[in-house]
Image: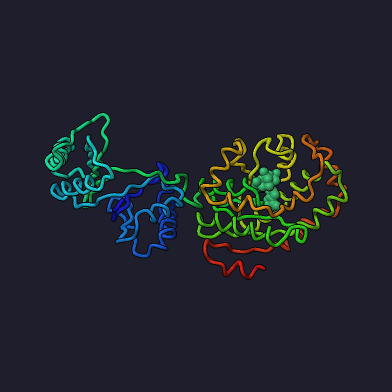
Amino acid sequence: MKTDVILLRFGEIMLKGRNRARFENQMIQQIKRVLRPLPRAELLKESHGRMYVQLNGEDYEEAAVALGKVFGLSSFSPTVKAASELSALQNAVLQEMERQPAKPGTFKVSVRRVNKEFPYDTYEMHRLLGGHVLEHYPEIRVDVHDPEVELFVEIRNHESFVYSQKRPGPGGFPLGSNGKAMLMLSGGIDSPVAGWYAMKRGLRIEAVHFHSYPYTSERAKQKVVDLTRALADYAGSIHLHLVPFTEIQTRLKESCRDNLIITLMRRAMFRITEQIAHKRDALAIVTGESLGQVASQTLANMNVIGRAATLPVLRPLVMMDKQEIIPVAEQINTFNLSILPYEDCCTLFVPDSPSTNPSLKVVERQEQWMDWLPEAIREAVEKTELVLIKPDDKTDEDRLF
Ligand code: ATP
Ligand code: MG
């Protein structure tokens, strides 16, 4: 559709309350960020707080795709903007009619009169604007119950908006408005999706990845960098913490029962992630766990593993099926990266029959015998590499390898 103005709508949460100014600033920052590749586009604010994008010749579809990456945006509309005067509004409804993709047989006008000083009331405006359309489209009929086109007219103090289409935005909360969390990011399908849901809920995330170099390859690490980059499309940039996990894994393998190694490994991962979280002022850990999906994700295992963390562990996918997760992974462009074959640190150490019902007591007793573990965890945190990943910028990551 050809348009030069996009009217933006935010979730209810934006409308009231003390946080409004902060939320609005966060939204403005994110919208400006995604519109950067469209340099002529401007973000503007109508006197009453309505925000819109003036495209100044930039492509609407490109802008619509970019806006799809701004959490907190509930919907948006290609819009005709007009002065709040009768003749200007009459022209605007005709313009909106002209750009309908198919010629409609029926229509209706819905006026919202925010400007209480406007000389005509809502009822008169329905008649004046509807009549104007009928004059120019003799074959069209008014249908107030089920119109093919509904022309929404929002009359504000100086400027008014006319639109007939609404596109859903991603919804959720503005990025960062609910604080920060650490995302445990493997190379699999689930954890990137969990990270996306966390961001959608207003959490800024930092990713933590455990690698077992040289058992895992540079390409496995690269895959996680690429996944982080795909997520950074929604955030502008994401810090990625790369934790050397080889030593802990090999020592665990030597010193614990085979069927408990996954449980113990995951507990060590949680402890390390939590220490990094404290350093980075994050208040939660996000994982891609989904109840019952694999042996390490039985309720008993989640219980024993989760107790290693004291921060809240958020599991956005916990009740989701793989068939529900995969379409999201595709939509956020992580699926094709996730299915690349490079091995994960855990798959290398997976025993034949991991315990699905570990005893917390047994696990804790085993850990007590491992007097080397706290020091090894501290060392892993200390040797963690930190990189800042941006959507298109390769410089920071080049320094890494
Ligand atoms: P995913 O598809 O996210 O890899 P999964 O179904 O393979 O998940 P697991 O391998 O049991 O499940 O991992 C459960 C969760 O533990 C992951 O979703 C992720 O949050 C975390 N995790 C697993 N391996 C790693 C790793 N190498 N680095 C960081 N986090 C990890
Ligand atoms: Mg995995």
Residue 36: tell me if it is visible: yes
Residue 351 at x, y percent in the picture:
81, 44
* Residue farthest top in this picture: 145
Residue 181 at x, y percent in the picture:
59, 51
Q: Is residue 121 above or below residue 99?
A: above
Residue 274: tell me if it is visible: no
Q: Quadrant of residue 37?
A: bottom left
Residue at the location (68% across, 37% down)?
293
Could you say which is closer to the camera, residue 316 or residue 132?
A: 132
Q: Quadrant of residue 43?
A: bottom left
Q: Is residue 240 above or below residue 109?
A: below
* In-image side of 346 versus 95 (left or right): right
Residue at the location (24% across, 38% down)?
104
* In-image side of 170 versus 315 (left or right): left
Quadrant of the drawing holding the C terminus: bottom right
Protein image colouring: rainbow
